[in-house]
Amino acid sequence: MEVLAGDVGGTKTLLAIAEVGELPGAGAPSIELRESCRYDSRQYPGLGDICRAFAAELGRPLPAHAGFGVAGPVSSGRSHTTNLPWVIDERELAALLGIRSVRLVNDFHALALGLAAVKPHDLVRLNEGVHDPAGPRALLGAGTGLGEAVAVVGACGRQEVLASEGGHASFAPRDEPEMEILRFLLRRHDHVSWERVVSGDGLVNIAEAIAHSSGAPLPRRVAEMVLYSRDDAPAAITEGARIGDPVCRRSVETFCSLYGAEAGNLALKALATGGVYVAGGIAPKLLPELQDGRFRAAFVAKGRMRPLLETMPVQVVLDPNTTVLGAAALAADGATLLPQARPTPATTP
């Protein structure tokens, strides 16, 4: 079955045509991504406009069924996106595009659905642990925001996904330097969430806070990007860290440690014996820093729960299309839920 699948983020939207088929004896469908295109989300007034632009590039009608992972809460087929001024509604979007069905879920819900299609070489371990195939799985990932979800094995072995907005839970500093970061951000925001420190902009926030509290300046190029091209600043901070700038290096180290701390928080809440999966756009770009031990040290540093966390596998998901794969599976599943058209009764002359 051919479907339209999409990963709708606060910065970028990836759309793809996917072929979804059954694998005999397997628990997940086979999914092959075909034509795809990435769009700057902020340049469009809504998802429908991006889909129509994609159809124009394809030069043919869109498939009859579509699925989208959306960066934001989804309720009753409707989403007010968190980092975009969009409202997306399943029925309205289907009518606008002239297709039979649209399914919307939180992007980390779609990510969980797509994990089964990720190849082993696209998973990198940060903590070995012991995988329990029947245990809950925790998923989180920093990008424009911080997404979180939990997946459990439900009735008849079917995966059930509990999407969340856990990235907006209150940030909890662990020591005095992190308290300084919180104090700095409280001057700007009434509520400081984990997303304010574990996201692309979170890395920038950390760098600004460290420069302010230490009195050491950011490199001139980084400081200019923070002021005039903030979306590009995380890459500049990472580059500065790798060439030895002390403020940038401390910022990246703090970011990785906070990432591990929040991963450990989610792992405890989900009792994630099935594993913790770290996704999103930032993890692959910071993979060497995530592997240097700081992330794992913060992940397991939960007092009496340390032995439990040491048994939980933690892996970074490198496949950038995982959410799209899950959205494709969602679209195909949505097609099966539609009532089948009844054959027209034959008429007698």
Image (cartoon, rainbow, N blue to C red):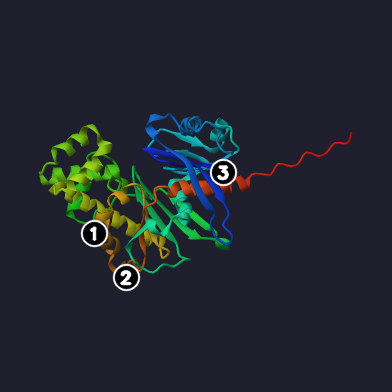
The residue beneath circle 1 is 294
Q: Are marks 2 and 3 in contact (CB under 8 Å)?
A: no
The residue beneath circle 2 is 307
Residue 179 shows in this picture:
yes
> Which sits earlier in the primary sequence, circle 1 or circle 3?
3
> Which sits earlier in the primary sequence, circle 2 or circle 1?
1
Q: Which mark is residue 2?
A: 3
Count of numbered circles in the view: 3
For the residues labelled 1 and 3, the Cα–Cα distance comes to 43 Å
Q: Amino acid at mark 3?
A: Glu
Element marked by disc 2: helix
Q: Position of residue 4 (x, y in %)?
A: 52, 41
Of badges 1 and 3, the one in the foreground is 3
Element marked by disc 3: strand
In the image, is 343 to the left or to the right of 91? right
Q: Residue at x 32, y 46 (%)?
A: 195
